[in-house]
Each structure stands twice: as C-alpha cells, then as structure tokens.
Amino acid sequence: MKYTEEMILHSESGYCMPFEAPQGQDVELSLGYGEQKHPQTGEKFFHHGIDFNVRHYMLSAVADGIVSGVGNDSAHGICQTIRYGMYEVTYGHLANVFAQFGQRVRAGQTVAMSGELLHIGVRFKSEELNPLEFLTMLYGNIRALQEAGGHDTDNFPDSEMTLKTDYERDKREIEELMLRFLPHYMEDLQRGAYTLPEHTEQSLRHIFTIGAMKEYFYETMPSMANPLGLGRKAMPLACKVQNLLIADFLNYLALRHEVYLSTMSGEVKKNFMTKP
C-alpha cells in the first residue's frame, strides 16, 4: 500500500508498536490479516485485523490521541479504540483498560493490558486497513526521524543500564504477583479504592522535580520502554522510583488482599495487619 502525505501519522515519541517485547524475545503473530483458515475446523474466514501472542502485556499509545470507544463484544472481548488523527486503532481481547472513553492520551502513555492475546484492527477515515501496513508506516516514520536527527532509538535499559532495585532477590515472585494483581491495583487507584500513601506521593514528586531541574529527562530519544528518554545520568533517580513503586504495590497487596512476599517476616506482616 502507498501512503499519501495525509496518511502519515507523525509522532516524535519513538513508538511504533503498542507494546514492548522483553529483550531478546520475539513476538509471535498468531493470526494475520485477510483470508485465514480456522485452526480447528479448517473453515476459511476473513480476519479484520492481526493477533499477537502477548499475554498480559502493558499497551501504550503510539501517538497523541483520544479514546473513542471502550466496549465488550463476543468476538474480541473487552475492546478499546483510540483515535490518532484520522486513524482509529482498536485493541481487543484486553484484560483491563486504563484510559476510558473520551480521555486524551499522550504517546507512550499506558492505556490497557492485553489478556491471553492481543487483537489489533486499524481504520483510516472509516476504511479498514491491514494493521501491519500501519505499523510499518510508523516504523518508517521513526527511522526517518532517526536518520534526520541522529537519535538513537534503541530501547532502554541496555545491558549496561539495567536497573537494580532493593527487591532483586524477590524479583521473580514480584513479577508473578504483578501478572495476577496489577490490573486490580490500577483499577483501585483509578476508583479511589486505594490511595497512594502521602509520603510515597511526596517522594515521587520530589524525585521528578529533581530530575527536571537537573535535566535528566529526554537525554535520549524516548521509546516505549523509556518514555522519559532517560540516560545514564538518571540511573540513581530511576532506581529510587522503581523502589518506591514496587514498595507501594506490595503495600497495596498487604492492605487490600492480605498477600505478602514469601520472604517477608512475621513482624512486618503484623505491622500491616495493625494499619487502619
């Protein structure tokens, strides 16, 4: 397909996919666009989008836009549609939605979480497109920006910049808990059923203020894994933010679900149980 000038979606964010695959891991396209054959029945049908095998991946906006639809249907389960200019991109088979109908979103903002897989459908001025062509156009846009400005769009962090938190020994257990409880955590935050402790909120504000004053943000080209464009000099602040966010997630688990890390001592559990 040849894209006309009005069909080029401009975004200097460095995003060409709504999710980021783990480093060294390929993402599998489980079902393509167009005429397909049903894997069980062998029956031919027309697939109006593409599917990825991405279980419980955080999904981000690929450009600035507005959520034009949130719903649930028999074919694709929970769905969210975001309008980027004259494009409408629909994400289906979602586990949770974090950006609601009518909400404006910025490039790189987390908008949803995939379920057992992810369906993507794309329309331009209500005309259906092959989503792969849309994603290829975005990638070409990023490459053009990279060549014009000499920016490095490699994902952050690299092998020399991996963040080390205070929870390294419990990392695997925490990741498993996040897969299970993160949608509940985000939903309770949005509904006000759980509020960030005042000291945590103040600490985060302080860290971001310091980062802005020292010009730590946008040192490199932003990407989906690094939306603030953090570089090496921001590592100490980034580690502090990670520690605060993990600590708050664990605080939420203890207070709302009475779930604790297996390595947590009985005295620490007792302190949580006495909190109002």
Image (cartoon, rainbow, N blue to C red):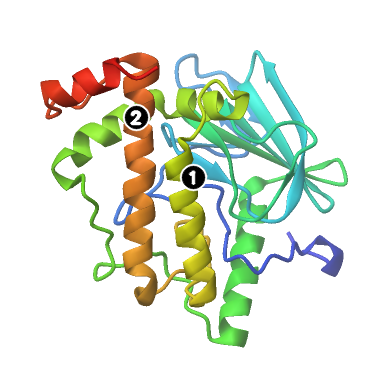
Residue on which disc 2 sits: 251
Q: Secondary structure at mark 2?
A: helix
Give residue 229's mark: none
Using a 10 Å C-alpha cutoff, classify the residue at mark 2 as few (fewer than 14 neighbours), some (14 to 19) or many (20 or more): some
Using a 10 Å C-alpha cutoff, classify the residue at mark 1 as few (fewer than 14 neighbours), some (14 to 19) or many (20 or more): some
Residue on which disc 1 sits: 201
Q: Residue at x 45, y 38 (%)?
A: 57
Q: Nearer the viewer, residue 18 or 235?
A: 235
* Observer able to see residue 258: yes
Residue 10 higher or lower than 42, as above or below: below
Q: Are marks 2 and 1 in contact (CB under 8 Å)?
A: no
What amino acid does circle 2 point to?
A: Asn
Q: Nearer the viewer, residue 44 or 140?
A: 140
Q: Residue at x 32, y 58 (%)?
A: 239
- Number of labels in the image equals 2
Horizontal relation, residue 10 to residue 24: left or right: right
What amino acid does circle 1 point to?
A: Glu
Q: Nearer the viewer, residue 131 or 203?
A: 203
Residue 151 higher or lower than 271, as above or below: below
